[in-house]
Image (cartoon, rainbow, N blue to C red):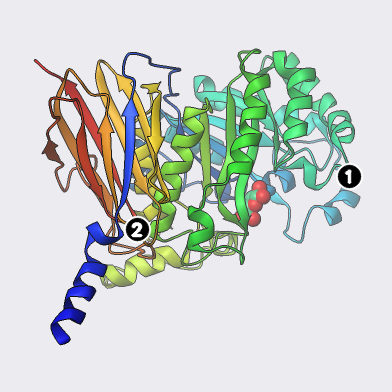
Amino acid sequence: LVSSFARMAEAASSPSAASAQATFTLQPGQPGRAISETLTGLSYETLQLSNPAFFSADNHALVTLFQRLNPRGVLRIGGNTSDYTVWSEYRGALPTEKFGKIGPQHVFMLHPQSLHNLAGFLRATGWKLVFGVNLKIGVPEMGLQLARAVQEIVGDHLMAVQIGNEANDFEKDYAAFDHAWMPYAKVIRAAGIPIAGPDTGANTDWVIDYAKRHGAENVFLSRHYYRDGAPNGSIPNLLATDTDFLAEVEQIMRVADPAHLPFRLSEANSYYSGGRDGVSNAFASALWGADFSLALAQRGVAGINFHGGTLQSVEASLGHGADTSATSADLSARRDAVTSRYSAIAGDVALGFQPRPLFYGLRLAQQFAGAQTLPGSFDSGGANVTAYGALRDGKVQVALINKDAARHATVTVGGLRGFAGGQLMRLSAPSLDSRHDIVLEGIDGAVAGRAIGVDAQGSCQVALPRGSAAYLTFDRSA
Ligand code: BDP
């Protein structure tokens, strides 16, 4: 009796018992559109500029993390705080009666020093800038003066200025937004400054209306994305594919593509209100971030700016100094504590910086930047598994993402006739709720990938444990 129980238990826990059989058959002869080099980007609040030492060439730790994430990234500065930012050099009148309506926070006074340091940070990282100016206060002249200063100081690193953040939260409909936006766009465009928008929170219909009315004057179209708002959210919720949103993206692409307008998610992350603890900052977010980025890249989205940064209250008070006596576990916990839960990078100037789990998922997705998408037929075998293929310089790249919390999968990757073996690199962690000990083989240097063979039929089998991902590259036979 005991031994048969033991055998059952063993069978139930062995990968083959619960393993889904998935197949991914590629068509390497039919590459599709090129994936943007700027796929993976980051977004921060304008209030982050309250400490000029944050975005500065001297902030070596942050410079290094940005470069590791993407040597050609895009930094978006904006968020709610862009709509209560006042430019210190503006000498005109401000409608002080409006400040009551722009949130409980105090008005943030942005000084030139922060922009000079930001310019140094962009030069050091090689990143471009998307900068949001205030729409809510309703003073186009201040928006223009700030946009001009940004362009003068940042130069070629400026990709575009956006006007207002999530105006769908304070303008009653698209017509009202358009009416408020027009006077800004007119003067900013007349000054020769590139613009983008509408930077709405949701409202795909606004993006489409905006594209029709103003597309030709813009360098890209934008909106935001969050799966839901904290405290809602859970690991299963995040890992279930948001098919409704993907359908909205396709609606936008049907307008953006014929107009040759790139579409970017200028702000995105898992759960708004700073993220959901134990989800946004856990390993599940790495699998979500990789899958979400690649699903959007496949549909032609040019870039995603994952929102994050230090908590506003902490950064505003700057009340803590570096404590060199702290153990590394203490330091890591303190960096986590000062940072929004969804941020891909944790830490601040005083404490230093470290990657969060999401960072590793974004690094995996960024491996596909600059490659061409490859069509493939995919059967997930009933598990929550996704697969992506791409072609770069004759090499095939594949990402397999097992978002299933319960089921292991075995994926047969086919269509690789003429390809010799390749490399298999895994993205894994002890569990989906792990906050540390994330391993990204091959890409991050510390742990190498391993060789994988392709059989005479042009296929190979990849065991994909539940809650993990694999990144594969295949070379042509010599
Ligand atoms: C977005 C805002 C951003 C916030 C974020 C959040 O644009 O400024 O920080 O929500 O609530 O809608 O986390």
For badge 1, the amino acid type reads: Pro
**Mark carried by residue 407:** 2
Q: CA distance from mark 1 to mark 2?
A: 58 Å
Q: Residue at x 58, y 23 (%)?
A: 152
Q: Residue at x 22, y 43 (%)?
A: 462
Query: Looking at the image, is 356 positioned above or below residue 122?
Result: below
- The residue drawn where x is 52% and y is 25% is 300
Which residue ends up furthest to the left in the rendered image? 478
The correct choice, above or below, for 271 with respect to 426 in the image is: below
Residue 349 visible in the picture: no
Circle 1: is it few (<14), some (14-19), or many (20+) Cα within 10 Å?
A: few
Count of residue discs: 2
Q: Position of residue 75 (x, y in %)?
A: 50, 36
Residue 149 falls in which quadrant of the image?
top right
Amino acid at the residue labelled 2: Arg
Q: Is residue 264 visible?
A: yes
* Most foreground residue, 291 or 164: 291
Image location of residue 137, percent across then percent down: 82, 42
Question: In the figure, residue 474 lies in which quadrant?
Answer: top left
> Mark 1: which secondary structure?
loop
Q: Position of residue 10 (x, y in %)?
A: 19, 71
* Quadrant occupied by the N terminus: bottom left
Q: Secondary structure at mark 2?
A: loop
Q: Which mark is residue 477?
A: none
Name the residue carrying label 1. 95
Say if disc 2 is inside 8 Å of ligand 1.
no
